[in-house]
Image (cartoon, rainbow, N blue to C red):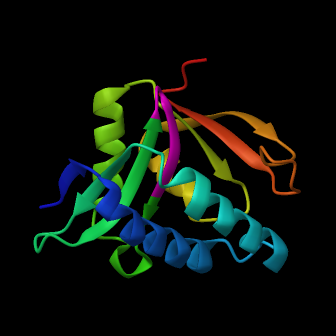
Amino acid sequence: MPRIRLGNDADVPRALAIWRAAVDATHGFLSPEHRAEIDTLVAEQFLPHAPLWLVDDEGGTVQGFLALDGDMIDALFVDPAAHGRGFGTALVEHALSLSPDARVDANEQADNALPFYEARGFVRIGRSERDPQGRPYPIIHLRHGGAA
């Protein structure tokens, strides 16, 4: 049974390793330059400062993480080796327990993200041609239950 817990500074290296493995497995559309740029931002500016919710497996190993800012899911990543074992769903359910009208932005080109969120009750509410940093990666905006 997955266990959700609040992360701490000691969890940042594992969260970063999960982020890197997940992005490498699902974000092949990123240019090498953008991948390196985003890695630096995540490693130095995002993960060390974001309040992280972690999901541990039965043995206590962190298998994924969630960053939630108000009703916005800023990040949700699961170790690719643990995909399909319920860890991502457990994190989404935790986010919804804290914010029933949660929102999330997903890369349109990450073909696993949209079906994952839509299967869990999220609906598309918009689209941006570029990511928040202006890079040419379209973003799909979703909200749980479709509230505007």
Which quarter of the image is occupied by the N terminus? bottom left
At horizontal 38% and vertical 26% (from top left) the residue drawn is 99
Magenta part of the chain: 69-76
Above-or-below relation of 52 to 39? above
Q: Quadrant of residue 32?
A: bottom right
**Residue 110 visible within the image:** no
- Label total for image: 0
Q: Position of residue 12 (x, y in %)?
A: 40, 63
Q: Nearer the viewer, residue 50 or 141?
A: 50
Task: Check if residue 73 falls in the magenta segment.
Answer: yes
Which quarter of the image is occupied by the C terminus? top right
Above-or-below relation of 35 to 48? below
Q: Quadrant of residue 112?
A: bottom right
At horizontal 38% and vertical 82% (from top left) the residue drawn is 81
At horizontal 40% and vertical 73% (from top left) the residue drawn is 79
39 horizontally vs 31: left or right: left
Q: Main secondary structure of the magenta part?
A: strand
8 horizontally vs 129: left or right: left
Q: Position of residue 47 (x, y in %)?
A: 49, 55
At horizontal 76% and vertical 67% (from top left) the residue drawn is 37
Q: Position of residue 41 (x, y in %)?
A: 66, 59
**Residue 29 visible within the image:** yes
Q: Nearer the viewer, residue 89 or 133?
A: 133
Above-or-below relation of 98 to 59? above
Q: Quadrant of residue 24?
A: bottom right
